[in-house]
Image (spheres, rainbow, N blue to C red):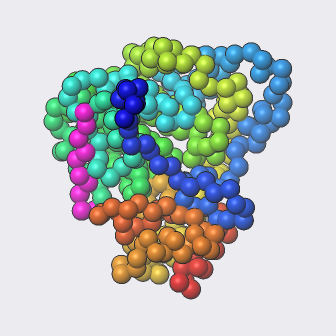
Amino acid sequence: MKPWEKNIRRVTPYVPGEQPAKKDIIKLNTNENPYGPAPGADRALRAFDAERLRLYPDPEAGALVKALADRYGLLPEQVFVGVGSDDVLAMAFLTFFNSKKPILFPDITYSFYSVWAELFRIPFERPALDADFRIRKEDYFRENGGVIFPNPNAPTSLAMGLSDVEDIVSHNRDSVVIVDEAYIDFGGESALPLIEKYENLLVVQTFSKSRSMAGVRIGFAMGSPSLIRALNDVKYSFNSYTMSALSIAAGTAAVEDEAYFKETVERIRKTRERTAERLSALGFVYPEPSANFIFAKKPGLNAKRLFEDLKAEGIYVRYFPGPRTGDYLRITIGTDAQMDALLQFLEQY
């Protein structure tokens, strides 16, 4: 090893889902929304004056923060925005998880959590989900340096009831609790009402799923003014201009197009339920889905082989190797036509 190599920070990076360049595939592997962004966002982008790109964007993303505050009945000082929820969550790890005590998150969950913990040198422990892939709230009733979990969880798609979420928050008033709600619009109850009661609670959401804007990269956090102020202090110490002017314009318009948002979320829910019923008829089993995907297995069927055979047919789903997840495939909910193609393949398979 060369002398300078000894000072390189080494981590095991997060592995995102495949983004194949080939056309004419059915892409059900990264939980993207199959429907386009809101018409309002499209109009905002078409009307955007390219001359504005010579200027720095608003570092506060004020228009977007106000639109989100109005939409969720909050004050602007209760809202933080970033470049996708990954950026927001990374800032939250850096800002709030600085104790020598371990932070807690589930053993089967969004795998970026362990990456950030290692990157920022944060000690962590991962309480195991129960046999049905559910979070055991009692595992979080102990001393810690912070708590984070998704609701609904990923990749299981299971949602925790709001009373159980509050139970975890109420048992951890001495640390920051982050509820990652990337999929909350598709099922479950948001913890947002609890932020008025618990100043240590941060609720994080994203535009990538229910708002069809994964390519724009917008995430946001909602919490007490003290939490949001701390996040902004770290953000401005790291990179003041994180969000482009185009993203601010498109995101603001998307929030204001509420009718389209509700319409597409409901379409995905209906397609999810229809898909779940047909998978059951084929002998697949799965935890009760509350997100825009289904985590399914068929007893006796080799999931990795099915994953590869689906890919050979141009149908991409997600496979998670591991002793507890290796029998399952995570299947994003696409359009009705895309799901029909998947189901027809499975019937023949």
Q: Is residue 174 left or right of residue 181?
A: left
Eyeballing the image, is 322 above or below 153?
below
The reply to whether residue 72 is in sight is no
Q: Residue at x 67, y 65 (%)?
A: 25
Residue 324: give x, y in percent of width and height: 30, 63
> Is 97 contained in the magenta span?
no
Front-most of 273 and 10? Answer: 10
Magenta-drawn stretch, dominant element (helix, strand or loop): loop
Q: Residue at x 29, y 23 (%)?
A: 98
Q: Is residue 133 left or right of residue 310?
A: left
Residue 203: give x, y in percent of width and height: 42, 33
Q: Is residue 114 left or right of residue 99?
A: right
Residue 48: give x, y in percent of width and height: 81, 28
Q: Which quadrant is the N terminus positioned in?
A: top left
> Is 128 contained in the magenta span?
yes
Eyeballing the image, is 309 above or below 145?
below
Quarter where residue 119 is shown: top left
The magenta-colored residue range is 123-132
Front-most of 304 and 175? Answer: 304
